[in-house]
Image (cartoon, rainbow, N blue to C red):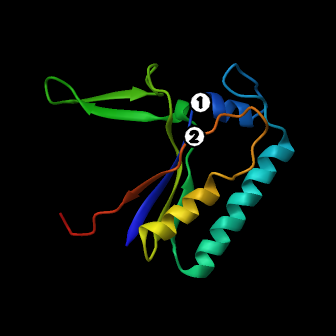
Amino acid sequence: MKYLVMVQGTQADYEAMRGQESAHSPAWSEKDVQTMFAFMGQLNDELAESGELVDAQGLVEPARTRTVSAGEDGRPVISDGPYGETKELLAGYWVLDCASLDRVTEIAARVTQCPAPAGAPVYPVVIRPIDESGC
């Protein structure tokens, strides 16, 4: 079965990874960022080797978000950037083809072990089965 495994983040997290400290997160050093990328790269390599990796992507910062919704007149309303009330947004994801929910849960537990500087926020990893029934 295929699963979507999601990690969350905020604009402040992206800024922290560029070295900008905030009340939300400490500044990351270049070494911190490289350590995180190495961890994720190794995980992706292992998942590709096992045949479980379908796709994996990190997403750009929320400030580069565009939202399209239907206006009252049915015409599209386009907004750039995240809404002010938005806290965490999708920061990256994996699409995995795993034998069981237990297996994908093991993988998600590994994702929670991704290195980060002390004091950095910790978010849950969300697992959603993908509906392949064609509906």
Q: Measuring from the top left, give residue 37's x and y in whole percent.
A: 73, 55
- Residue indicated by mark 2: 123
Q: Residue at x 75, y 43 (%)?
A: 116
Q: Are marks 1 and 2 in contact (CB under 8 Å)?
A: no
Residue type for callout 2: Tyr
Q: Nearer the viewer, residue 133 or 102?
A: 102
User: How far, Cα to Cα, is label 1 from label 2?
Assistant: 14 Å
Q: Residue at x 70, y 28 (%)?
A: 25
Residue type for callout 1: Gln
Q: Quadrant of the C terminus?
A: bottom left
Q: Measuring from the top left, give residue 102's x and y in whole percent.
A: 47, 68
Q: Residue at x 42, y 72 (%)?
A: 100
Q: Quadrant of residue 121?
A: top right
In the rendered structure, find residue 11 and report the number of the disc placed on it. 1
- Label 1 vs 2, first from the N-terminus: 1
- Mark in front: 1 vs 2: 2
Dot 2, how many residues are within 10 Å of its Cα: few (below 14), some (14-19), or many (20+)? few
Q: Quadrant of residue 28?
A: top right
- For the view shown, which residue lies furthest in the front direction? 102
Instruction: Give above or below for 59 relative to 119.
Output: below
